[in-house]
Image (cartoon, helix red, strand yellow):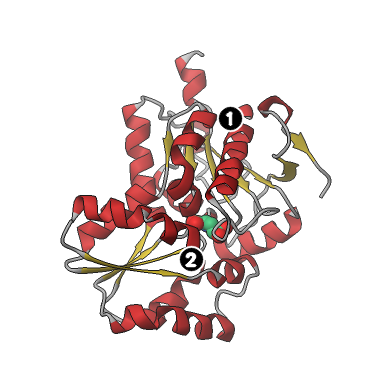
Amino acid sequence: MNITLKNNLPIGIFDSGVGGLTVYRSLHKRLPDERFLYLGDTARVPYGTKSLSTVERYGIENARFLAAHGIKMLVVACNTASALALPAIERAAGVPTVGVIESGARAAVEQAKTKIGVIATEATVRSGAYRRAIERRAPHVNIIEQACPLFVSLAEEGYAETEAARIIANDYLKELRAALVDALVIGCTHYPVLRKVIEETIGEGVMLIDSGEAVAEDTAAALETHGLGRAPDRENLARPRRLCDDLDHFYVTDSAERFSRIAEMFLGSAPRRLEAVEVWGHDQLNAGRKEN
Ligand code: DGL
């Protein structure tokens, strides 16, 4: 493909649901000239309670779906899929692929001195991916991990700043609080939706590391390395990019209305271009649409 045409393709992003919007927001801010194709696999969320083979199959199907729509790079905006299946997803996508674990681990080691807490899904904690990525960079640091599965439902249901969220956060984070960690890695892209409650519960003086923010830097570096950056559009110089504007396209595998409502609560604007699709049971050229 002609280099300029390729550079003009969007960057694909996928997550099991609304969580990857936290990564989309960071990417959008860091890379305002880029376009994004976002897939939220809302019909099959949560991924964090599922087995390796299931998460791998979902990840491959999502990657094929996005590749069939034309992307130049893929960001796996899901810690669970990044932890369990990144190499298989990259093969299926056929384009350079960035996961969130390495970026989160790098940012944590830059911030923390002795004790790092990691909150993530059950599958991510069980995989040991964060532990390995942090220990590789800082072998002497003490790592304490905690799965917080209900945070995913609280985010998907729009229950982020409720009393229920505070009670659950208090229970999940009590050991990390008692252990006096220096930094807390938010190792699931759904959890930053609850950032305020997490911050209040873990207490002052603990640095929160959002792997989504860290991955935006790594994606910018990967675009540079592969020579895939998009030149600014002349007409857009006068028209600043806005989150969820019509230059980005969103797909979900279940109710578009529901996704739109949560996106608006979290990002302050609902996607202008949003469609419900089926990604499973199709090969990549047959990825099909379905009724909302
Ligand atoms: N947001 C995803 C993650 O970062 C998955 C959450 C889930 O579906 O359980 O792990």
Closer to us: 171 or 292: 171
Mark 1 element type: helix
Residue at left offset 48%, top offset 66%: 191
Q: Residue furthest top?
A: 2
Q: Position of residue 165 (x, y in %)?
A: 54, 80
- Residue 247 visible in the snapshot: no
Mark 2 element type: helix
Kind of residue indicated by mark 2: Tyr
Which callout, 2 or 1, points at the residue further toward the start of the chain?
A: 1
Marks 2 and 1 sit apart, C-alpha to C-alpha, by 27 Å
Q: Name the residue carrying label 1.
A: 67
Q: Position of residue 234 (x, y in %)?
A: 48, 30
Q: Name the residue carrying label 2.
A: 191
Left or right of 199 in this view: 263: right
Quarter of the image where one finds residue 115: bottom left
Closer to us: 139 or 165: 139
Left or right of 160 in this view: 208: left
Residue at left offset 58%, top offset 30%: 67
Q: Determine if the C-beta at disc 2 is less than 8 A from ligand 1.
A: yes
Q: Determine if the C-beta at disc 1 is less than 8 A from ligand 1.
A: no
Quarter of the image where one finds residue 59: top right
Quarter of the image where one finds residue 124: bottom left
- Residue 225 visible in the snapshot: yes
Q: Residue furthest right?
A: 291
Mark 2 surroundings within 10 Å by alpha-carbon count, few (fewer than 14), some (14 through 19), many (20 or more): many
Q: Residue 166, which numbered label?
A: none
Residue at left offset 50%, top offset 71%: 194
Compared to 12, does 284 lie above or below?
above
Residue at left offset 22%, top offset 58%: 109
Left or right of 283 in this view: 23: left
Compared to 168, does 46 lie above or below?
above
Kind of residue indicated by mark 1: Ala
